[in-house]
Image: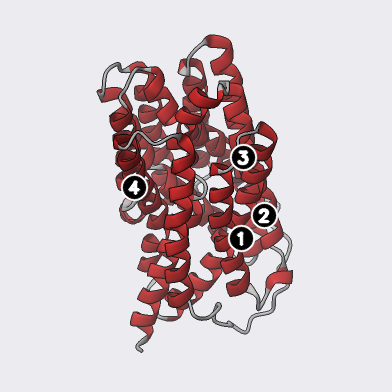
Amino acid sequence: MTPTSTALRFAIAGMIAMAVAMGIGRFVYTPILPGMMEELHLSPADAGWIASTNYLGYLVGALAAAGGWAQGRERMLMLVGLGASTALAALMGLSDTMVAFLVIRFLAGLASAFVMVFMASIVFSHINAAGRGDLQAWHFGGVGLGIAVSAAMMAALVTEHAGWPAGWLWSAAISACGFVVVALLANEGPLANGEATHEPALPKDWSLMKIIVAYGLFGFGYVVTATFLVAIVRQGGGSRVFEAMVWMVAGLAGFPSTWLWQKIAARIGLYAAYALACFIEVAGVTANVAISGRTGPLLGGLLLGGTFIAITALGLQAARQQAPRAPRRIFALMTASFGLGQIIGPIAAGLLAQMSGDFFLASITAAVMLVVSGAITWSAAPKSP
């Protein structure tokens, strides 16, 4: 096989792995949540805690995976994470207690982080060797693909009047199919680059510190809508099919978003693109609760999906630009900051929603965080001489 065809095969494997572990494994909670809240009488605060334990698991997993202990075992650990993500989705459908939900979603977060970190190292080594960095967009597009697939699944289940456990069980079935395809396509680990694994300490730089803080604020800002988008639609009286449609729009917008924002970043600069994407997401987060009828949620889904995956990638790129000699250390620190924001976001939003009776205040708080994140990153851009 030519290096290009090999790179394409690994990019497709990465896309499917991201669809399973992130698009479904992490985000299928969003469209299933309203049914869980209704049938199990979960409060918005309960829902926020369940989401946050998943993000805590992701944080712990990402920090663990960023260490050097996993070298040479990346493919095995990625497949373990993918298999665990599948099994844990099934377990969610077979559970009905708050304690079980917290434990399962924590472990699912851990599994998704292993897939995220190890699959990235595998895929990027192969596409970089072929000089096909453009294929990174395929890899990240998997998150949007997984969201769109889960939305189609929920639409089908709604027409069959299936309960919330069916959403988890069918997610597990789809994930199992994805696992098999990834195992076949990604038939080896990352290419060895022969470089020493010891990285220097991160530079003590004010611009780098700004990016790390801004990334944490983004984690808080995006996750409120990403967690409660469908619950907001249900609270507004939207039909079950419309809920699935809003989530489908988010997924379809997410699929090409990284490719699109890389083009924008090439035109206006990485930091300006990050800030612009944050400001566009603010419009979506606000529209979701401020514009009544179908327009607000559809706009919210479109603008959330069209930005949040790309901002995640742009933020990591900006940080790597500031610390090029320590990619693993900066990945760990950025993930820690992002993870902290993600953990605090759903808890704060759930409590605010419970206190105020709807998600308006929580969404406006999230929008403010996104504005600040965009502004801080913009100010961190290297000044031209």
Residue at image coords 53%, 29%: 369
Within 10 Å of disc 4 (Cα), the crowding (few <14, some 14-19, many 20+) is many
Tell me the SS state at disc 2. Answer: helix
* Mark 1 or mark 4: whose residue is earlier in sequence: 1
Name the spot of residue 315 as percent of width and height, x first.
51, 49
Spatial CA span between label 4 and label 2: 25 Å
Q: Which amino acid does label 2 sit on?
A: Gly
Spatial CA span between label 1 and label 2: 6 Å
Tell me the SS state at disc 1. Answer: helix
* Mark 1 or mark 3: whose residue is earlier in sequence: 1
Q: Mark 2 points at which residue?
A: 61
Q: Does residue 292 appear left or right of residue 98 in this picture? A: left
Name the spot of residue 362 as percent of width and height, x first.
52, 21
For residue 3, what is the image quadrant? bottom left
Residue at image coords 36%, 17%: 236
Looking at the image, residue 132 lies above or below residue 34: below
Q: Mark 4 points at which residue?
A: 148
Tell me the SS state at disc 3. Answer: helix
Within 10 Å of disc 3 (Cα), the crowding (few <14, some 14-19, many 20+) is some
Q: Which of marks 4 and 2 is in front?
A: 4
Residue extending furthest bottom? 1
Q: Name the residue under label 1.
A: 114
Within 10 Å of disc 2 (Cα), the crowding (few <14, some 14-19, many 20+) is many
* Mark 1 or mark 2: whose residue is earlier in sequence: 2
For residue 348, what is the image quadrant? top right
Tell me the SS state at disc 4. Answer: helix
Within 10 Å of disc 1 (Cα), the crowding (few <14, some 14-19, many 20+) is many
Residue at image coords 74%, 61%: 201
Q: Which amino acid does label 1 sit on?
A: Phe
